[in-house]
Amino acid sequence: MRLSHKSATLLVLIPLIVLAPIFFPSSFYYRVGSLIFINGLAVTGMVILIGYAGQISLGHAGFAGIGAYSCALMPVHWGIPPVLAAVLGAAISAVLAWLVGRPILRLKGYYLAVATLGFGILVYMVLTNETWLTGGPDGMTVTDSGLRDLAESVGIDLKNSQFWYWLCAIVLVVGVWLALNLQDSPTGRALRAVHGSEVAARTVGVDVAKYKLQAFVISAVYASAAGSMVALQNEFVTPDVAGYMHSIEWVTMTVLGGAGSVLGAIFGAVILTTLPQVLTAFAEYEQLLLGLIMMLVMIFMRDGLLPSIMKRIRGKDE
Amino acid sequence: MSELLQFLFSGLTVGAVYALVALGFTIIYNASDVVNFAQGEFVMLGGMITVFTYAAGLPLPLAALVAIVATAAIGVALNKLAIEPARGAPVVSLIIITIGASIFLRGVAQVLFGKQIHRFPSFSGDAPFRIGGATILPQSLWVIAGGIAVFFALYLFFTRTLTGKAVLATSNNRLAAQLVGINTNWVMTLSFALSAGIGALAGVLITPITNTSYDVGIALALKGFAAAMLGGMGNPKGALVGGILLGIIEAMTAGYLSSQYKDAAAFVIILLVLFVMPQGLFGAKQTERV
Amino acid sequence: MTLRNLMMTAATCSMAAMPALADINIGASISETGPAAFLGDPEAKTLRMEVEKINAEGGINGEQINLIMYDDGGDANKARTFATRLVEDDEVVAVIGGTTTGTTMAMVPVYEDAEVPFISLAGAVEIIEPVNEWVFKTPHTDRMACEKIFEDMKAQGFSKIGMISGSDGFGKSMQAQCKGVAESSGVEIVADEVYGPQDADMTPQLTNIKGSGAEAILNSGMGQGPAVVTRNHTQLAIEAPLYQSHGVASKQFIELAGTEAAEGVRLPAAALLVADQLGDDNPQKPVVQGYRDAYEEETGEDVSTFGGHAFDALYILKAAIETAGSTEPAAIRDAIEQTAGFVGTAGEVNYSAEDHLGLTLDAFEMLEIKGGEWTIVE
């Protein structure tokens, strides 16, 4: 019996998350794990945008910035609990993505890339310049979300990094599950049609603009949630979270791992999140090696790492 | 009045820097439809290699020439080692390759040249010209002249030379170009050499104004890319006008509105222009082949 | 599968870096690359060089220092990760670093939680106000630099000040501090402009300052921006004198700005830049000369006060470990807090339970560039 794509993905993902800690030599690895899950969440959104709908964005860190600073600002100014602030931040991101997406998504290719880049930079600039509100480039403290205390009160007593490992894991799994459901829905099929050929999709009556916008809004919510998770975990946030390098990083993770599937993109997040930690042993050559690896993977495994590896494994079986 | 003129001079100086970077994007894009995100690193290499060859005792013009030739060679190597083997890969993969190349080149420069900020002297001294109460540095005129010269050279290259037309033909339809006997591999090699060379030239011209270090490439590539898109990708006219326009918008915003938000103003205007003209100011309208 | 392999690789790497048991593990998270590399690079070089020197001379209390240093690239989230790694994985007894205020503040909760002493190399006053039991810092605060500059401006008879600041963390932080103390220092800020750290031309901002009636101009910024501002200041022939911040504190600045343009520029800086001009009775003289000569010989680059901050942090830590006679983080912390009369590159440091900065305004010298050289303003 062949497993559905959805169950297969979750059947790979969940055991890996649960079993990985067995091999952790210290609780620092939980921290790396939680970062992988946060990036994984963001790239799951990117798969919906890049992989399903075939659109590019170099500005999604802007939405992460909105998510992160919602958690930082709302509790201080309006007394809203940080967790609720994260939800509100996602809502703001969605509305903003809807407003910005309508005109932007008429653009194609590099024009779309530069427009989204511009959007991300605008968010970053506001966070950097409005020092009175955001603390400027030096950042601001985020109120303790109280989640860990809550867990403790119901008897789950974990170290900080362990707690965030499991919380981020749960959020990731939920995010992935939703994305997989979307893929199997009529919207998912419409998006794939758009990806294949916009003109063809339009001729068979698909409302191309609507579906592209939907993908953009959903991916913005994922990015916003990722930003909120960073802010809540670190209890400190700087405008870097919205920097365009992070947008580019997410696109790179997605494409490097394999934009066609959630699992591929998450694999990309695993690689690019752990690589800098592994490369600290060669500190001076870190950048050089990182660039080299990106080029080599894309030259020799152009569908992305995971699909290429799978193909090789399958190829041997047959 | 003298204020307006000063802002304009500032805008022209900065705009010419952007235009030179944007012009570098044009050729590779025309030959391969790839926006080369390592273009900023070519600019950095032009400046840095000149700094070190000049410090080693070469006269400035010779040092600059060495830098341009060396960077062109690096451009060719990039094409042969990374772009050619990836032939046929989707555009987004090619973007990642060029971003990888940019990180790689930056990493190499960091190891070889260190992280210090460098500069070499202006070509014609630092005594500013005074015009109508405003001032402009001789080196700014060098940069502006350089931008215009590269523009005309490219314009003539693409419209008057067989090779230039071959580049455009390759971009339009690689297979058809091959069928009419164009050596598309050679066209690609040439494009990378030229783009890298122009980038390096930009680095040589702007370093006395902007200073240089191993990581100046990112910011330059970003602004150059934005300028090129504003003008319309692939068109030398678009690169020149887009660059100058971007510089002037920034200077006017800094002068009259808010220096905090000058970069923001530039991107807002790019967004507005793209909403009205989705192919930039001078970009060719493209229809999707089905 | 591969996730696990990677984790294993990561584990082996850090195992390989693991020292023999008797060593003292000292951690550092520095912004060697990224926007603050101009500050972080000399800090990292200084730490490597001085640790090697201390070890060659027999280490601390007979034990070798094992320096575990990471490059956070100026990114707060990365710094936070490295802080966790230093504490959880490398089991360091003390940490130096946080090149920027952002990375410092992101790391503080980790060290506070793990009860590991932390000596920051960043400028902002928030780091030590309110005092955090585990957090110290070595550089002067931005606020002190502002006060020193305003004091000199007042003495020159200037009361209307134009400010131009870099939009990076360093520039913005100092801009905010200077605006905060302007009134109490008796100066009025009549123009307030900003530029991007890698901008090519600042003449529009300076033109506006020129038109604002400012009697003196203060540029808070670091890296290449201040060099461009200085050249543009000369280009526009602005009469109001230009003051730079402590962010340009290396000889390289004069080369980048050009000797002519830099003529007459004033700034507050530590004695390190004018080591040879200090009086022979100045206790700082042998310290700063020794460090400067060693640094310039080792790296072939001009010494900067940023490297000096790292130098001070390392030697304060060394002295504290010697005094404590122990490598227990809590004992080291207590000994750091009792640091008194420590003569470093930034001045004389006297920490106390209420003061984790330990420097006074006297530690700053007012310098002026004359003929391409720093000179002390009398």
Image: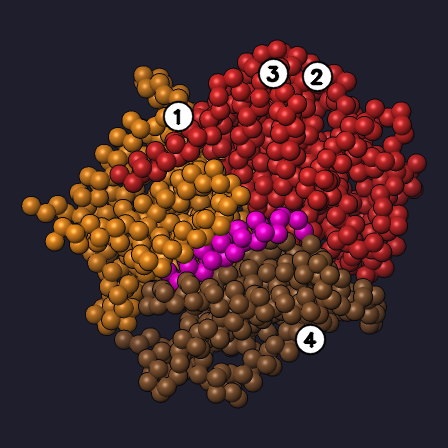
Chain colours: A orange, B brown, C red
From where the camera sits, is residue A304 visible?
Answer: yes
Circles 1 and 2, Cβ within 8 Å, touching? The answer is no
> Which quadrant holds residue A177?
top left
Cα–Cα gap, marks 2 and 3: 21 Å
| Residue A223 located left or right of residue C376 | left
Q: CA distance from mark 4 to mark 3?
A: 65 Å
Image disc number at residue C339? 2
Q: Secondary structure at mark 3?
A: loop
Residue beneath the point at 27% across and 68% down? A197
**What is the chain identity of the residue bearing mark 1?**
A
Q: Amino acid at mark 1?
A: Ser
Residue labelled with disc 4 = B145
User: Amino acid under label 4?
Assistant: Ala
Q: Is residue B104 magenta?
A: yes
SS label for mark 4 = helix
Main secondary structure type of the part rendered in magenta: helix
Work out how far the residue at label 2 is from the one at label 4, CA to CA, in angstroms: 60 Å
What label sits on residue A27 in the rendered view?
A: 1
Mark sitting on residue C62: 3
Given residues A14 and A312, the one toward you in this image is: A312
Which callout, 2 or 3, points to the residue nearer the camera?
3
Residue interval drawn in magenta:
B92-117
Q: Three-letter amino acid code at disc 2?
A: Thr
Secondary structure at badge 2 equals loop
Magenta span includes C9 = no
Q: Is B175 drawn above or below residue C155 in the view shown?
A: below
In the rendered view, would you say C343 is above or below A239? above
